[in-house]
Image: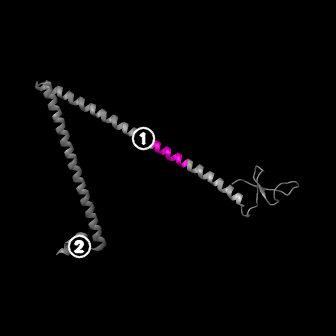
Amino acid sequence: MENLTPIREEEGSKGPPEGRISPSGDVPTPPPGTPPRSEEWASLFGEMATYLSSYLDSKIDSVKLKTRETLFQALLLILLFLVAGCFILVSVVLLMYGAALGLEKALGIETWTAFLITGGSFLTVAALSFKWVHWVQKKRGFNAGLRKYGEELEAQRKKFGHDAMDRATHSTQ
C-alpha cells in the first residue's frame, strides 16, 4: 500500500480537510473508515483486474517455459537413444562380420557359409535370451501376485478372524 500523509488545514489547500493525499499529491482520498464511492470501486476493480491479468500472464509464461523445457529434454533423450541404438547396431554388425571372417579362416569354409552360420547363431542366441527374460519376468510377476494375495488373506484373517478363501470353502461343504 502507498504511504499516504494527512493534509494539514491551510489556506488555499485543495481537498477535504480530513482527507489524505497520495505521495504524488494529485489524488485526494477520503479519510480511513469512509466507505468507497462507486468510481473508487471501479478503480479498485480495474487495478485488481490489471494485477490478475499480469499474474495470469506470468503463470502462462511459466507453464509454456516448463513445457518447452520438458519437450526439449524428451527430444534429447530420444536422440540419445537413437545414437546409442545405432552405436550398438554397428558394434554387433562389426562383431558378427569379424566372427564370420574368423570362422571362414578357422574352418576353411566358404565366406557365405561363415556369414550364414554366424547370423543363424546370433539369431538363435537372441531368441533364447528373449525367451529366458520373458520366463523370468513371468515368474517374478506370479510370485509377486502370490505374495500380494497372501498378504491380503493374512490381513483379512487378522481383521475378521477368517479370510475369503475360508468363507468360500466352508460355505460349499
Query: What residue sits 25% from the left and 70% below the top?
Result: 164
- Horizontal side of 54 relative to 120 (left or right) equals right
Res. 146 mark: none
Rendering coords of residue 4 (x, y %): 75, 55
Compared with 34, 170 (above or below) is: below
Query: What residue sits 24% from the left and 53% below the top?
Result: 140
Disc 2 residue crowd, few under 14, some 14–19, many 20+, Cα 10 Å: few
Task: Give the SS element for disc 1.
Answer: helix
Rendering coords of residue 147 (x, y %): 25, 60
Quarter containing the C terminus: bottom left
Res. 167 mark: 2
Residue nearer the viewer, 61 or 37: 37
Rendering coords of residue 46 (x, y %): 65, 54
| Range covered by the magenta-colored residues | 58-69
Compared with 147, 171 (above or below) is: below
Kindly indicate whether the residue at mark 1 contacts the one at mark 2 (C-beta within 8 angstroms). no
Res. 73 mark: 1
How many numbered marks have been drawn onto this rendered protein structure?
Answer: 2
Task: Give the SS element for disc 2.
Answer: helix
Q: Quadrant of residue 145?
A: bottom left
Compared with 105, 156 (above or below) is: below
Gap between marks 2 and 1 measured at Cα: 54 Å
Disc 1 residue crowd, few under 14, some 14–19, many 20+, Cα 10 Å: few
Compared with 167, 12 (above or below) is: above
Which amino acid, mark 1?
A: Gln
Quarter containing the N terminus: bottom right
Majority secondary structure of magenta residues: helix
The answer to whether residue 72 is magenta is no
